[in-house]
Amino acid sequence: MTVVSQPKIDLFAAETITLNDIISVSEFVNSSERNKIAFAEKAEQEMSKPGRKNYLALGAALAMVGKCEQAIEIFEKADDSKEKFLELAFCLRKTGQYDKAIESLDKAAKAGVDALAVNCAKAAVYRVKGDFANAAKALKACENYQKASALYHYTLGRHLQGQGDYETAIENYKTAVELDPLYSKALFHLAFLLDLRGDDEAAIDYYKQLINNGTPYVSALLNLAVLYEDGDQYEKAIKCVEQVLKYHPNNLRAILFKKDIDSSETMLYDEEIEKNKDQQTKILETPISDFELSVRSRNCLKKMDINTLGDLLRITETELLAYKNFGETSLTEIKHMLDSRGLRLGMASEGKFPDEIQLMAGMQESEADIDDESLNRTMDEFELSVRARNCLANLNIKTIGDLVSKTEAELLGVKNFGATSLVEINKILDSLGIGLRKID
């Protein structure tokens, strides 16, 4: 968000002010919460000063800080001018006094405001009122400005958007931006409609163009943050929100949004951690029977109540050798099996694990190499006997991915799962070009 420089004119000290003066001061005042608070305090001080006051400046100041009802009372005391009638019409529209707003715009026309500005302002009043027929009439009166006025195409875009004709509205906003690349309101509504349509890339481009053109636009930054968050670009989203909070620290939407983004990041991080923990737990719970070991080694481990890989990684060489009938040959065999997987005895008790534990050193095809679509297919898609289906259900095998994580031994170890069922399973996997998990 670019900081708007302080305008050269002092609204309260100037003898005469123009509409451009009011616009430049308004941009500065609303560029930060601090500016707005300080300006509101100054306006109150000017109100309390004795003697004749510059009511036009005071009314405009109150409108800038959102005190439209009070501004209307002050404008009634100001000398007639085109600036007064335009600003008064704005405040009347904001407070729902639509007919009076139209009357004020008619007076603005008589005071010298050009027909295009008056008719576009009238169209805006009618649109907010919900009177689209009269809004269309006001726009019809200035249709000769097609392809020539950014204001006309922006106002027409708002009219069409209000009626739900988003596609035509988008085209008019694009025309407005082509005619005036710095037209902030047209840029915002163009980005907003593209955002609604799901064209995130184009919406992001226009939002970025808007926030980089020198005008602080809180809504644009927050909408851009939403798009970044949806794309898991949390750092960019946070930067957008932080830009808002830097100048508007009490903006409730930004405060809540920052909490949401922080929560999303934490949830994503925790989810990954839990996934890794679950994977490690599964690996540590792998039965010793899944590994090719001699009968002597297997029996010794069983007698020592070492049934899983985790149990084996918690015991030391000394403890193994201290067991009766456990010799150097068995120790060498076990160490070789663990070494091939980057593991060693005793490492679990030390709390040390490699980032990845390769259970199947001989497996040439990683899960990443297998078609995800195949792995995600459910077992219900395949013709299986009732016995085979029930056995898979007992193992909580619901997808092909679940199935290929099992060995033949694990399947055959399930009650009622025999060679016939195994043939059925292998036939399905062969058709997909994959197979059950193999062990050394």
Image: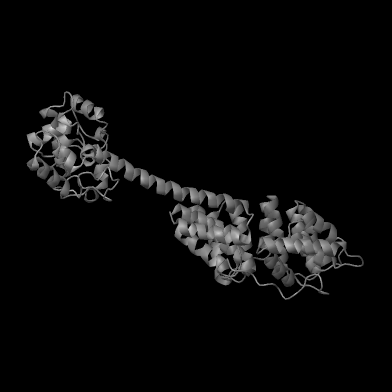
Residue found at x 48% / y 55%: 227
Near-viewer residue (255 or 87): 255
Task: Report the residue at 28% width, 48% height from top.
Answer: 352
- Residue at (53%, 60%) from the top-left corner? 240
Residue 124, percent from left and from top: 68, 58
Splitting the image into 4 quarters, where does residue 6 fall?
bottom right
User: Quadrant of residue 43 in the image?
Assistant: bottom right
- What residue occupies the far right of the structure in this picture? 51
Residue placed most toward the observer, 409 or 63: 409
Instruction: Say whether residue 134 is left or right of residue 14.
Output: left
Q: Provide residue 135's location: percent of width, then percent of height.
A: 68, 56
Quadrant where the N terminus is found in the figure: bottom right
Q: Is residue 165 above or below residue 440?
A: below
Q: Residue furthest bottom?
A: 8
On the picture, is 128 further left or further right than 262? Answer: right
Estimate the x, y position of residue 437 in percent, counting from the top left. 17, 41
Q: Nearer the viewer, residue 190 or 316?
A: 316
